[in-house]
Image: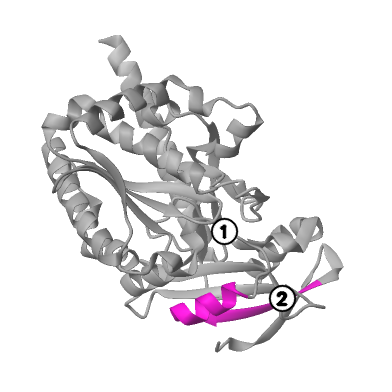
Amino acid sequence: MTWLGSEQRLPLRSDPASVFLLRELENPTLTELNELWATLQQPVQTPFQTPAFLHALKATHCRGHNTVLSVISFSNAHQAKQPVMLLPLLRYRRGPLRVLEVPDCGLADQTAPVLDASAGNAADGLLPKAIQAYFSELDDIDLIDVKKLHYRVCGLNNPLFAQSECVLDSQTRRLDLFDDEAGGSWRRKAIYKKVRSKYRKLTEMGVVFEEATTPTERLSLFSVLAGQRCDRFRKLGREDSLQREERASFYRSLAEMETLNSPYRAFALRHGHHIVAALVLMKSETQATPVLISIGDDKWHSYSPGMVLFAKVIEWASEEGVRWFSFGTGEQDYKQRFGGEPLDTRRLLKPLSARGKLFLRAREAHHTAHEVLKIAVGRNRDGE
């Protein structure tokens, strides 16, 4: 691996006895990402910070000179070659602003560092301070903007979520698939009984649940999913973001990788040569998150193929030993029917320059004006 610059010593002002060693890997190849991740003894990560995900994002969204992917390695001073945390970062320009984020580009449903579970509780309290100290040293960034922060990373505290500049962003829902072993009841919820009945009827008609296991199968299924989704969005009069070439290229890049190295998993309800419904899932060792779903011909809609496929994939994840099934951003009604708990997500907005502070003031003023307008419109309607 070729590190950018020399190793940086980062003492913590709040804890002078603690010193972190930082190294930056800029514009990494997939091989370099895999080598760096292999230095963690017990890596804990979401599917959206895996080497394959970052590599596909870099290949499809970092083609200009103004967008650069890098990874910061945090190690304890006495164990320089043993990172306790890897922080993927994306630098880009948003108009005149120089922005830093954990790679998202609208493709990640959760942002976080990659942690090493073997570091123990001692590192847990220091990592938020280490990130804060690193951010305070940056002089080439106007604004840090990290969305979709969950408070936990597969069971460990997310040090980005603890930053004081975080604000409430949205909500998500997460299902603990191990809860069933402890007397939980997610399998006994009415929705699972209902979809099992629907699935029996579908199987009687020759429909099968299957995973696309080869690159060729995954690419073929993605093509069908994209077509079905495009048709549905057109009927609804909505824009389909999957029609953007860089976004479709991102998913194709993941689909064509070998499954061992990719978080991309694809499933379908198939009837002969026809796809009744299709779903793409991002999976790490302990977490799974569905990111794309489509439904085929209208004649199948009375059998709720989308709900059936969703339930089958949850059961598949449980059988694979996945603990956390995350439903992605938003608290739509259908997600609540599958169980789990609602979770608030945060957004880290931290200005590092006068330009960044000006942007945040303008953003807050715009938000206030929008809220005042909503109140005024509501009062006018009440008076009609």
Q: Residue at x 27, y 59 (%)?
A: 218
Secondary element type, mark 2: loop
**Residue 330 rendering spot, x and y as whole percentages:** 42, 37
Q: Which residue is mark 1?
A: 45
Question: Alpha-carbon distance for marks 1 and 2?
Answer: 17 Å
Q: Residues within 10 Å of mark 1 (few under 14, many from 20)?
A: many
Callout 2 crowding tier (Cα within 10 Å): few <14, some 14–19, many ≥20:
some
User: Which residue is rendered at x = 24% and y = 56% of the image?
Assistant: 222
Specify whether residue 289 is painted magenta: no
Viewer-closest of 92 and 256: 256
Q: Do the residues under discs 1 and 2 have CB atoms within 8 angstroms?
A: no
User: Which quadrant holds residue 197?
Assistant: top left
Name which of mark 1 and mark 2 comes first in the sequence.
1
Is residue 329 visible in the rendered structure shown here? no
- Residue 94 visible to an observer of this rendering: yes
Residue 375 in the image: above or below residue 176: above
**Residue type, numbered disc 2:** Gln
Callout 1: helix, strand or loop? loop
- Residue 380, how many percent across, how many down? 30, 17
Q: Which residue is mark 2?
A: 82
Q: Residue at x 58, y 72 (%)?
A: 37
Q: Can you say which quadrant of the picture contains the C terminus?
A: top left
Residue 90 position within the rendered picture, expressed as x and y whole percent measured from the top left: 47, 69
Picture quarter containing residue 328? top left
Question: Does the magenta-highlighted stretch encompass residue 25?
Answer: yes
- Quadrant (top left/top right/bottom left/bottom right) for the N terminus: bottom right
Residue span colored magenta: 19-38
